[in-house]
Image (cartoon, rainbow, N blue to C red):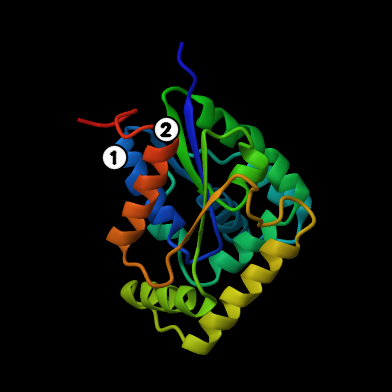
Amino acid sequence: MSRAVIVAIDGPAGSGKSTLAKRLAATTGLRFLDTGLLYRAVAARLRATGGSPLDAAAAAAAARTIEPEGLDPDALHGEGIGGDASRVAALPEVRAALLELQRRFARTPPGAVLAGRDIGTVVCPDATLKIFVTASIEERARRRFEELRARGEAPIHERVLLEVAERDRRDRERAVAPLSVAEDAVVIDTSTLDVEQSHAALEAAYAARIGSSANRTS
């Protein structure tokens, strides 16, 4: 049996990593997982049951009930859930509960494209290809602001900017699996790139490391 192709795409909130990862999965025939949705699902489950995102035991119990299939991105991207997701993601108990699930998904043939914050450094350090997608904080806040408006919400730009900055701080300073660039990752800055340009850069990195014809859909 051939070894699964694993593409790890990491980056801060609003960098475009999930959108790009999903597109790459579609063009390569690999499975796709936005690992951030797992933590959002844990946060949403705690909210629904009145639990706190700081309650490690309750959050870990919720994490053990999450499955990657069937997650609804639209339901998990409301304003406020991202902050709670960042809090539960800082809990070692939650990360431990979700780690093997992510690895099992990645290693199932033919492989997968995983988007997250610690895929290339912790979840799949042996990934076939590692990408770190980034963008300026101003651009990432603008994208988040427009995303919330498109969902019919009424965000305040200054508040969105502060929330993005706070999520960056929590993600980089957490004790377990902090956001960082893997030493062998290809860095793609999307600050001044549109989706097509960003996808072209990602495809070029994939072709250089894995091959332009490997695992392609017809």
Q: Quadrant of the C terminus?
A: top left
**Mark 1 = which residue?**
27
Q: Position of residue 93 (x, y in %)?
A: 76, 45
Q: Secondary structure at mark 1?
A: helix
Q: Position of residue 11 (x, y in %)?
A: 55, 58
Q: Give the amino acid at mark 1.
A: Thr
Q: Is residue 100 above or below residue 193?
A: above
Q: Which mark is residue 88?
A: none
Whether residue 14 can be seen here: yes
Residue in the foreground of this view, choosing between 106 and 198: 198
124 sits left or right of 143 in the view: right
Q: Earlier in the sequence, mark 2 or mark 1?
A: 1
Residue in the foreground of this view, choosing between 210 and 29: 210
Q: Nearer the viewer, mark 2 or mark 1?
A: 2
**Mark 2 = which residue?**
210
Residue in the foreground of this view, choosing between 68 and 29: 29
Q: Is residue 197 above or below residue 30?
A: below
Whether residue 52 can be seen here: no
The residue located at (72%, 57%) in the rendering is: 90
Q: Position of residue 12 (x, y in %)?
A: 56, 63
